[in-house]
Image (cartoon, grey):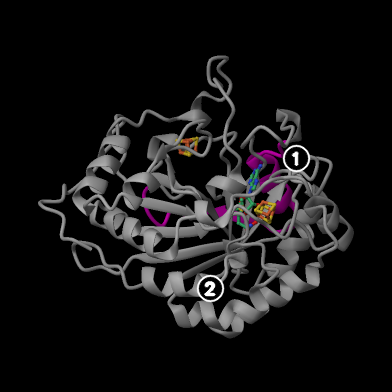
Amino acid sequence: MNNLSTPPLLVADTLQRPLRDLRISVTDRCNLRCTYCMPREVFGKDFVFLPRAELLSFEEIERVAGVFVQLGVQKIRLSGGEPLMRHGVEHLIEALSKLCSTEGQPVEIALTTNGLLLSRKAQALKNAGLSRLTVSLDGLSEAVFQRMSDSTASVTTVLGGIEAAQRVGFSPIKVNMVVKRGENEHEIIPLVRRFRNTGIVLRFIEYMDVGTTNGWRMNDVVTAQEILALINNHYPIRQLDPNYRGEVAKRWMFADGGGEIGVIASVTQAFCHDCSRIRLSTDGKLYTCLFASHGVDLRDSLRRSESDAMLARFIIDTWQHRTDRYSQMRHEATTFQGRKIEMSYIGG
Ligand code: SAM
Ligand code: SF4
Ligand code: SF4
């Protein structure tokens, strides 16, 4: 990429939050239909996914990622949809893993996957230079997993993917469980038991009101407090300090040394004050909040081949105008003023 003239040391938004994390959705398609994310009534066989020409190419993603890194982004997470369904995603990872910050630090490349294609992809992902891997799994019971993912896929396939990732050297692997009341809270302890003492960090995510299709109700949220109390009853836990400022998951360890768990309490303990994340949708729109209703189009500028300095100016302007703090304002009547975009499109 062109060298940007005098890059700013810090791009901050209206609440003085720096721009540090970029999440890229590499596909809006998925091989599951989790009821809390892509309910089949909406994402059924008639749903029209983005045509190929609308997707950012790998070259376009590389270019824009390079500009973000020059502006201070230190971590890039690939998501979707299901990122392993994007053909050749390992080639994109290989290119991104060569990016270095202005201080010469390598950028951390992470990926979140449902794990179904992981057994066959793990080695290629490792070879490509992927630094961190998160696998989503909402239960060990096949019945619960199949109901929540509205599919006939098997837990065994996901566990096989996690084992393959361990074998090729990913460490620590994180496993994300979304907890939804009446659906899978009874799977919390079996998952804890399964992943304790394995080096895998299990993380519990409060069910969120992302998008407008999942029929979210506050009553369906099993709160972080409830989750931690339940675990503590079975396996006493102690809170750990965050690894870094703005870490989304609160960290806990088993008092007997059985490892670490995390809780992402985006509903009951909002962390907007430290939110340094920007999202790039599959078709090249920038979103400054997971709950946004509008994005700004970067693809047009990319395809008009504007200079990197112009792309950087566009990104800086977008970030500097950012006021988002949806989770902190969730319960205020004025919070929601339009159709929120879906998580499968913007990336988790
Ligand atoms: N398909 C991949 C996967 O499931 O890991 C990546 C994309 S998915 C949108 C990213 C993460 O968002 C997953 O861990 C998923 O469980 C989480 N997620 C999706 N919808 C959610 C919701 N309504 N509330 C909380 N987490 C959600
Ligand atoms: Fe697909 Fe992931 Fe959404 Fe489930 S959470 S439907 S696996 S994108
Ligand atoms: Fe960041 Fe928006 Fe989530 Fe708040 S609600 S933490 S601003 S993505």
Relative to 151, say whether 180 is above or below.
above
Residue 105 in the image: x percent, y percent? 25, 68
Q: Tag 1, which secondary structure?
A: loop
- Tell which of 194 and 105 is nearer to you: 105
Q: Which residue occupies 33% across, 55% down? A: 64
Between discs 1 and 2, the one toward the N terminus? 1
Front in this rendered view, residue 256 or 99 = 99
What's the amino acid at mark 2? Answer: Gly
Q: Could you tell me residue 28's position as x and y percent? A: 60, 52
Disc 1 crowd, CA 10 A, few/some/many (<14, 14-19, 20+): few
- Residues 255 and 250: in front is 250
Helix, strand, or loop for circle 2? loop
Mark 1, ligand 2, within 8 Å: the answer is no
Which circle marks residue 42 in the picture?
Answer: 1
Q: Is residue 85 above or below residue 30?
A: below
Q: Which residues are magenta?
A: 221-245
Query: Is residue 74 visible to us here?
Result: no
Q: Can you see residue 335?
A: yes
Answer with the quarter of the image where residue 324 lies: top left
Residue 188 % position (x, y): 75, 54
Residue matched to label 2? 88
Which amino acid lies under the numbered mark 1 shown in the image of this protein?
Val
Say left or right for 312 vs 288.
Answer: left
Question: Which residue is drawn at the image coordinates 58% and 62% (left, top)?
Answer: 83
| Residue 220 place in picture, x, y as percent | 75, 35
Q: Is residue 1 magenta?
A: no
